[in-house]
């Protein structure tokens, strides 16, 4: 793996670089052969929080996770845990999809992996633990309004997004609150 570690509002010390390379290097145990991939790591300080973003683009697979914490080393540990869960989830789905077939993705992962402790406790008795389950369905009338009114409605409800019928175009649109505190609008293409 080729590491590209950079800091934003933060100096990358040799100890920090070694810690990241050691932790990310442990992900190699999930693969049959060491992936020939670039590991892009961005570390930054945002509002007294330490933020770590790791992106590992590979053939037919993109691993990406980010985490914020008060301590940079703890943030690195948390982001590695997220990447491990992504790998395990992807491996399970690939093995189900290509159970009888012969595909290069199936043989990308090792088969003798033990599940993580929290996965063992939650999957006892569950066969399809990685399937997405809809736990609640809501139905409501879409009131025609503009984006500003939709933002006001969203804020009044305390939600992070709001679905509405755009009064101008007549299409169904979504407004959402971004991590930076501003707002975004999702509209279908005409």
Image (cartoon, rainbow, N blue to C red):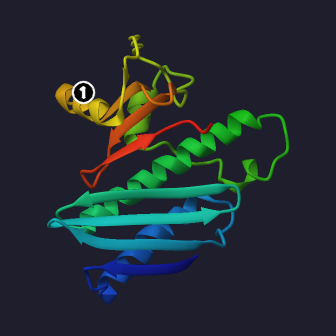
Any part of residue 180 in sight? yes
Q: Is residue 148 left or right of residue 87?
A: left
For the point 83% across and 34% down, which residue is it?
Answer: 100
The image quadrant that residue 131 belongs to is top right
Residue 46's place in the image compared with 134, above or below, is below
Q: Which part of the image, by quadrant, shows the N terminus? A: bottom right
Name the residue carrying label 1. 153
Query: Whole-percent x and y of residue 10?
Result: 25, 81
Q: Assign a secondary structure to mark 1.
A: helix
Query: Whole-percent x and y of residue 87?
Result: 55, 50
Instruction: Please tell me which residue lies in front, 9 or 12.
Output: 9
For the point 41% across and 42% down, which residue is it?
Answer: 185
For the point 29% across and 72% down, which residue is it?
Answer: 44
- Numbered disc total: 1
For the point 25% across and 80% down, which residue is it?
Answer: 9
Instruction: Please tell me which residue lies in front, 23 or 167.
Output: 167
Q: Is residue 156 left or right of residue 82?
A: left
Residue 61's place in the image compared with 4, above or below, is above
Q: Residue furthest front?
A: 168
Q: Residue furthest left?
A: 48
Instruction: Please tell me which residue lies in front, 108 or 177.
Output: 177
The image quadrant that residue 65 belongs to is bottom left
Any part of residue 159 in sight? no
């Amino acid at each position: 793996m080729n590491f590209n570690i950079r800091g934003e509002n933060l100096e990358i010390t040799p100890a920090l670089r070694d810690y990241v390379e050691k932790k990310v290097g442990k992900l190699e145990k999930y693969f049959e052969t060491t992936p020939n991939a670039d590991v892009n790591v961005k570390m930054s300080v945002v509002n007294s929080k330490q933020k770590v973003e790791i992106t590992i683009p590979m053939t037919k697979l993109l691993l990406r996770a980010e985490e914020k914490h008060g301590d940079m080393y703890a943030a690195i540990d948390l982001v590695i845990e997220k990447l491990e869960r992504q790998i395990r989830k992807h491996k399970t789905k690939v093995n189900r999809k290509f159970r009888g077939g012969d595909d290069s993705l199936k043989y990308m992962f090792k088969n003798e992996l033990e599940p993580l402790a929290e996965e063992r406790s939650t999957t006892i008795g569950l066969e399809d633990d990685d399937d997405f389950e809809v736990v609640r369905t809501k139905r409501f009338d879409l009131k025609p309004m503009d984006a500003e009114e939709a933002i006001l409605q969203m804020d009044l409800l305390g939600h992070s997004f709001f679905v509405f019928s755009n009064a101008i175009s007549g299409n169904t649109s979504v407004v959402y609150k971004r991590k930076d505190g501003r707002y975004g609008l999702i509209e279908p293409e005409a």
